[in-house]
Each structure stands twice: as structure tokens, then as C-alpha cells.
Amino acid sequence: MLYGRSTELAALEDLIATARGGRSGALVLRGEAGIGKTALLDRAAESASASGMRVLRVTGIEPEADLAFGGLVQLLWPVQDRLDALPEPQAEALRAVLGTGRTRTQDRFLTGLAVLTLLADLAEQGPVLCLVDDAQWLDQATAEALLFAARRLAAEQVAMVFATREEGFAAPGLTEVRPSRLDAGDAARLLADVGLPPALRDQVIAESAGNPLALIEFGVARRDDPGRFTPVTVADRVLSSYRAQIATLPEKTRLALLVAAAEGRGDLPLQMKAARTLGIGLEDLEDAERAGLIHVTESTVAFRHPLIGTAAYQGAVLARRIAVHQALADAAEDPDCRARHLPLATTSPDDAVAAELVAAADRAADRSAYAAAALLQQQAARLTPDRRAQAHRLGDAAALALNAGHAGQAGDLAGQAERLTDEPEDLARLAPVRAAVMFELGEQREAARLLLERVPSAGPGPGRDMLRTGATYAWLAGDADTVRDAARRLRALGGTDPMVEGMAHLADDDCARGLPLLARAVTADPADEGMARARALHSAILVGDDATAMELAAAEVARCRAQGLIGALPQALHLLAERQVLAGAHRDAEASVAEAVEIARDTGLRQRVAWLGGVPARIAAIEGDEQRCRSLTQDVPDVGRVAGESALSLLELAQGDYEAALARLEAVAGPGPRRHTAMTLAAVADQVEAAVRLGDHKRAEGPMRAFEAWAQAGGQPWARAVAHRCRALVDSGEEDREEDYVQAVRLHGLGGRPFERARTELVYGEWLRRARRRSEARASLRSALEIFERLRAAPWAERARAELRAAGDATTVAKATAENVLDRLTPQELQVVRLAAGGNSSREIAAQLFLSRRTVEHHLYKAYPKLGVGSRRELARLNLT
């Protein structure tokens, strides 16, 4: 009987019933030790099993908290026969976890996707309940995989429950239930079977503070020894009670309990193999078993409560703990198990032990368990006698911590390494990690300069990579001097890098030399998976080559999907979304951003979530949604500030607040790199128009001339068209002005950036109307209005309507824009129906979007009535562009 748990039981029953009904869910039971979390999981398991649900269960083990995927192995071992049904990259990731595969896992989140797919596949045969106890002791790789799956479950008939203590196991986004302390009535009912006199019962209730485990343990202890003293806190009282029980046992029994506690996994054969070297055997567990402290089966030893194991371990002296860990290490056949015990058995530097730990770190890294690998390298460093070798291993630990998403830890480890060596080549080796940490923390300028400072000792190959990365960091930071320095030093290493050289010329406002070099860098084969494609994409963006940039960004997204590179996908989707906005594909951009935000949140990339807001902010600015635009541009990291300011200035321009728009743009568009970033260049036309509307042509001339030079050197039709428009706005000569408008419209006709085309047609139409050429004006304005309405650019469409009314066209103005049926779909539904219309199966769509098959079909089920269709065959006949 569970007393005082009606609310908690109701939450669990609701979760299980929801899963049986076809919808997934997850919740966290969070509370102090002994509050009854395990009892609640037991009740949930009983209820689920009684209704025919499959139950999978795993318990975090404190000694295994640093053992890569130890928890996941425990959870998935019973269902490993289902791996062959998974998409191959996911199956290989789980085979690597279970030790049956050899392929190196490239992305630490691919395992989480594989867990999601596996649970969804299991649920095809009936609802599944996944229970995780003592989640605070899960190794990080297991915790990340399970949380990734929990956050992306939707329509799979899977329920997940995590029980954890107050500290540890952060699970933002999941529903939390906190079991309450028992009131006096429920506490008395729980103690009824202990047989305490009323005076002692009341004392135990007061001391236990409503903690169920404390009630039981204190009750038994006071019944047997009424005068026993107990410490102040509940946790200390419970531990003290367990230590007291253990202290009454024979010495060999205490040693056997220490072996069980140190081993942690309950592996009886391993414990007995180690025990024999310590002069004890299975019979020495009998007294502890009779006392109810442990449960022993043919192959396992389990403590009645984890705190009993804690008490057995903490109550032993250090020398005995070391001896036990050494015995366990010697008895272990699994090298990873041996590596777990060796550091706890070694108190002084030992090269041989350190080498074993490095090998274990390599195995963990191969399975993408970077956090565990970082700890193993750190332990290896501690046991390494040579200071320089120790620095190398700390550097490796720092790189692994960075791969695990722990920038702060990576910085600390790199700092420790730097204090151990003053060798220039060692410091150069550490620089990329230190710089990457600085970049993540928003210190782009400092990161770039650190890389350049340490290049001389890096060697030609690594030095070139450091200079390229440093130049990119410097460009993003607006540090023209460092960009130039990187280019000069690359030349000194032999040869040049067209991307860096091109950026250096742009930093000097020398577009004529810079853009042709960048155009040369836009030569990477879209199938190239290395840094060359990243440089090509960056160069294409700087040149304004929208078509190539879109192709490269789409290829990168496709590569991430095909290989399960979940951690890299948000950035690729971000770059693709920016290109989609420029192409006028706002719904596609919103879908890309929505997916990127969801994955970034699920994978803990919080800064990327904030940075992603710049894309929908620009869409909101175009549409005139002030509240949304301003909300999305709050708390944007510095690296995304230009995008936010650009969106706000466009909004203010549409509202007629020209001074605010101009001042904002002048603040962000300084000389050098800042002037040539993609967002700043896109906003030059806004800057020119705002100045012209204010009648201050002098403030328009500088940006206009700079943009003209950039557009001429790059040769992109859309850019040359915008340059002609800007010149037409600024020019005073009517003949020259018309020629610029005509050229602008002609160049826009070659394709690219429909919003800019509509703006050109709008201002040209305004000029034609003022010149009393009303028929020509109406044609230009109608075209502008059609584009603005298609883009849902409300303030701009209203301006075009006003001009059409003034030009004598009432028919076009009164015509309502037909609803686009795609507007009825959510971003994820849009992605799913497009892939389905293209002939992809639900399983193929699930693999591409990192969802389960049932979730894909759930989205299709919701989308069909919105689109007025009833099948995939009908869907394929729709125009979904």
C-alpha cells in the first residue's frame, strides 16, 4: 500500500492511459532519497504489465556514472534483436553501444535518434513503458540519448518516466512531479506494522519529516534500540542507520558488501572472482541477506536501497576500498570495466594504467560518448608522470569535452594543460579548443587573435587551418586587422587561400579584387563533406550568389540527414533558412527554423536557439508583425546582432519611422567586415531608402557607392538591380533615374530575391505615377502588389494598393488574395507532406526528419483534411511549392 500518493499515482496512470490511447509522453519524478520514487515506479510497472504493456527498465548506478552508455546497455540488452530493423546508421550506432559493432559514430545525438526509432518500433506491437530509476546516476551519454528520445516522442504509444533526486539530471521541457512528504496520518499508517509504542512512534514521525524510507528505517532502529542517537538531516539519519546495521555484521560480511558496493552493477560472478583474491566467498553474504540489506540471486546482488550501498562504501577505510577496486580490476574481463576500477585503485602516477585509460577513452569516443571519454582522458592525465604528456592528455580531454557540448569544462581543461607546459607547439595544439570555447562564449575577436598568436608553432598544415578559422572568427567579429593579418600569414606559409584573401580585400572595401577571389572559392563539389564545402558556402554568401549558396546549404542539410548528424543539423538548417527567406520561400524558411529550434533545444544548443530568431524576425518584419519581430530580436547573442538589427530597421522602414531605421543601420554597418556581412549588405537598400525619405541624400550616397562597387564586382543580377534602384532613388536627373529603373527591372527579371524585385517595382511605379504615366505605373504596381501579397508583406502591399488607387486602378485593389492551402499546415506538417508527395515512405521521412514513423503518419493524418485530400496518391497531385 502506498500512502499519501494519490496525486502522483494519478499522474502516472494518466501517462500510461495516454500511451495506451496512442499518444506518447514523459515525466520526471524528482525528490530526495527515500521519498518513494522507486515505489511509484514499481506501481507503474505493475499497472502497465497488468494491461499488457511492454516494460523496459533501467536503474542508474553511482559507480557507473562515468561508464559510457552503461545505462543504455542495461535498458536495451533485452531488445537488441530489433536493431536490424532500424535505418543502418542508427543500427550501427546502437551496435557500437552494445559492443557488437565497429563503426565510429560521428554524432553524439545519433544514438538518441536510434533509441527513439527503436522504442517506436517496439510500440508497433503494443504500448511501451520505459522506466528510469536513479536517473541522477546515469552516465551522460545514456542520459542524453534517453532525453533526446523523450522530447521527440509524439504518437508512438510510448511512455517514459525518469525518477531522480533533487540534484543532477536536468531535464528542461519535461513535466515534473515532486512526491510530497507524508502527513502525520499517512506516516502513522505506514508505521502501524513496525510495532512501536505511541511515544516512540510520534518521535519517529517528527524525526523522519514525512520521508517514507526514513519512517521505516527509524522505526525499526528505535524499536530495537530506543536510545539510539541520530544526526540532524534526514539523509544523514538514514545513512547513519544503515551504517549502524552494517557495523554489527562480521568483518568478512562487511568486506563482501564493500565488494558489491564498489562493483555497483550487481554482477555476482565478477564479485565472487574478486572476492576470492581477498579471502572471502559467497557464504560471507549470508548475514547481510538475512538482515534484509541485499537480495542475492544466481547471478546478481542487489541492495535493498541504493543508500545501503553508499553506507557500505563510505563506511570502509580508504586502504580497503583501494584493495577492493584493484581486485575488481584484476578480475574484470571487460577492458572498460577494468578501466573504471583502475583509477580508484591507483594513488600515484602510473604510465601503464594511464595508457589503459587512454585506450578506454578512445573506445568511448568511437561510440560518441564524449563526456565519458573526456573524464577518462582526464584521469589518464592525473596518472601520467611526465608533465608534457599530461598536458597532451588534458588537451585531448578538453577537445572531447567540447565535442560533448561542455564549453566551460573544455576551457578549464585547456587552461590546466597550458599551465603544465610552455612549449610553443603544445600551446599551438591547445589553441583550437581554447578558441572554440571563446567563440561559443561570444568572444570572437579574442578567439581569432589567439589562433593567430599561436600559429608559428603549429606547423604548415595545422597552421593553415588555424589561420582560416581565425580569419572567419575575425570576420564575424568585424576585426579587419586580424582578417588582413591571417591573409598575409597564409601567403607566408606558401600559396594563398581565396576565401581568406577575398575577405581581406573586402575588409579594405576593395570589392573589385575581393569578390573574384571569393567566387573562386565557391568551387567545392556539393558532395564534398569536408571543410571545403563550408568555405565554399561562406564564400557564396559573401558574393551574393544565392543559387549556389542555396544548393550548398541544401546539400549540407541532406548530408546531415543521411548520416544522422543531428548536432550539426541546426546550423545547416539555419543557413538554408536564411537563403529561403531571400528566395521568398517564407513557409519553407519557417519550417527549417522550427526544426532547427526543436533539435537545438533537444540537444542543449541554447545559444543557437537564440541566434535562430533572426530568420523569423526578418519574415515578421516583411509581414509587418511588430510584436513578433521585436520579441524575436530580444536576447540575441552578439554574433546574431546584425540580423536582428536588420530586421528591426526593415520593420521601422515599413512603418515610416525613417530616422530610427537609418540610425540603427548606420550603427551596425561600420567599415570593414561589418559592412560586407550578408545581412548588412541586404540592408543597404533600406539604409539608402530611409535616407532618401528623410531628404538627406548625403547619408545615402556613401552606402550606395559601396553597394554599387560590391554589386558590380560580384556581378549577381539581383545585386546589380538593387544598385540601380538605389541610384535611381538618389539621382536628381530624371532621364538617368528612368534608365536606372528600367535596368533594375530588367535585371530583376533574371531571377532572385522577389521581395527586392517588388520593392523596385513599387518605387518605379511611384515615380511613373508622379510623372503622370499612370498606365505604365499601374502595370509596375500590380506586379509589385502580387509579389507582396504572395509574401504576405502587409505594409508593403498596402502601400502598393494606395499607389494603385492614386493611379486610378480600383479593380486590382479590391481583389482579395486567394488563400494558400499550405498556410493551413504547421511547419512540420509542411515538411512531411512534401516528402510524402515526393514518394518517400513514412519510414524514410522519419529517418530524414529524426522522428518516428508513427509521428510522421500522425502529421499526415492531421494534414490530409486541411488539404482536402484523403491519400498519398491525391497528395502527389497537389502543387505544394
Image: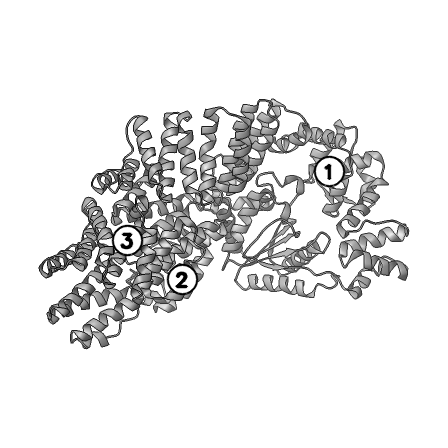
Q: State the image coordinates of residue 529 (x, y, percent, origin top left).
A: 35, 38
- In space, the residues marked 3 and 2 are separated at their CA atoms by 19 Å
Q: How is the image coloured?
A: one colour
Label 1, label 3: how many angstroms apart (C-alpha)? 66 Å
Amino acid type assigned to the residue bearing label 2 in the image: Arg
Of mark 2 and mark 1, the one earlier in the sequence is 1
Quick one: label 1 or label 3, which is nearer the N terminus? 1
Local crowd size for mark 3, using a 10 Å CA cut-off: few (<14), some (14–19), many (≥20): some
Give x and y (percent) for residue 4: 73, 64
Mark toward the viewer: 1 or 3: 3
Q: Is residue 674 left or right of residue 737?
A: right
| Residue designated by label 2 | 630
The amino acid type, in three-letter code, at marker 3 is Ala
Asked whether the viewer can see residue 530, the reply is no
Looking at the image, do the residues carrying marks 3 and 2 touch, with CB atoms under 8 Å apart?
A: no
For residue 148, side relative to residue 628 (left or right): right
Give the residue type at disc 1.
Ala
- What residue sits right under mark 1 in the picture? 260
Disc 3: which residue: 682
Cα separation, mark 2 vs mark 1, equals 58 Å
Lower position in the chain sequence, tag 3 or tag 2: 2
